[in-house]
Image (tube, rainbow, N blue to C red):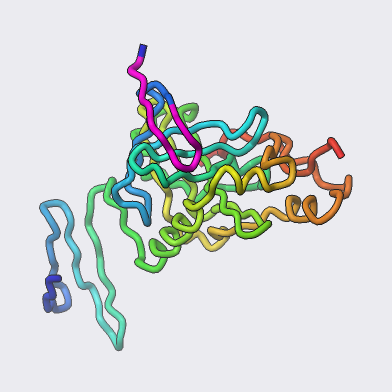
Amino acid sequence: MSELICFESRRVGRIEVPASDVVTFEALPGFPNKRRFVLMEHAPDSALAWLVSLDDPDLAFVVTSPWGFFPQYDPPVEREHLGMLGIERRDDVELLCIVTLSGKEIFLNLAAPLLINAANRKGMQVVSDDPRYTTRAPLPELRSAHQEEAPESAEPAQAAGAPPSAR
Amino acid sequence: MLVLTRRHGESVRIGPDVRVTVVASTGGQVRIAIDAPEEVGIFREEIFERVASANVEAASMSKAMLDDLPKGGNIGNDGLGGSDR
């Protein structure tokens, strides 16, 4: 049994997780000294999850797999990024995008996805200048769903958690 | 902050593993070459700052904000075009 870590986050409340769940990130831009995080579900069946800092009770990100919303997403991940995390097997790669809420609008950061090596629990944020993607890609479906009843024509999106496309 | 003057073709070492060389300078532009280990991230400052400010904005989310979303932020794995309406 892995040692249990207890932490009081002001964002999501009390956390108890096995130490083996901790993901250690290369410093995230804007948060140079916050390196230890855990992933927690938001609610059962939700595509959203929390990436909660264990170093700062006020720090937590909402994250999601981008492919449920952007099935064509081709993350700006290079071989060197995989090398930096020591990723050896395709199955060990986990990719998540940070979610931002601004008023009633919701955005995904497609330009700088989070990459996690599930095998060694190391993570990093890919900082790219890929012109195809922005740090604030809006999710239009949610906006319309909130204004009134969403039209049934909403395109069924592919299941979240699809594997990243081959690189 | 350390400020150095270097000529075309000259370099600066940052620690044992990082070398920055001036390869050209014309007009107001300086072209530099950077030799660094693979694990050292190298970014244009403005790109890094863009990601940093996006992170700072995203970091202020609370559970209550998600609960304010349609379906209480309980966006299902079917994406957002929920079929339950």
| Residue in the picture at 39% in, 25% down | A119
Q: Which residues are magenta?
A: A2-15
Counting from the top left corner in percent of width and height, residue A40 is at 51, 31
Counting from the top left corner in percent of width and height, residue B24 is at 25, 77
Q: Quadrant of the N terminus of chain A?
A: top left
Counting from the top left corner in percent of width and height, residue A138 is at 65, 57
Counting from the top left corner in percent of width and height, residue A155 is at 80, 45
Q: Is residue A6 magenta?
A: yes
Q: Is residue A77 left or right of residue B6?
A: right
Q: Is residue B77 magenta?
A: no
Q: Nearer the viewer, residue B37 or A138?
A: A138
**Image quadrant assignment for residue B45:** bottom left
| Residue in the picture at 50% in, 38% down | A12
Q: Main secondary structure of the magenta part?
A: strand
Residue, far top? A1
User: Is residue A71 visible in this depiction of the protein?
Assistant: no
Q: Nearer the viewer, residue A32 or B65?
A: B65
| Residue in the picture at 45% in, 28% down | A92
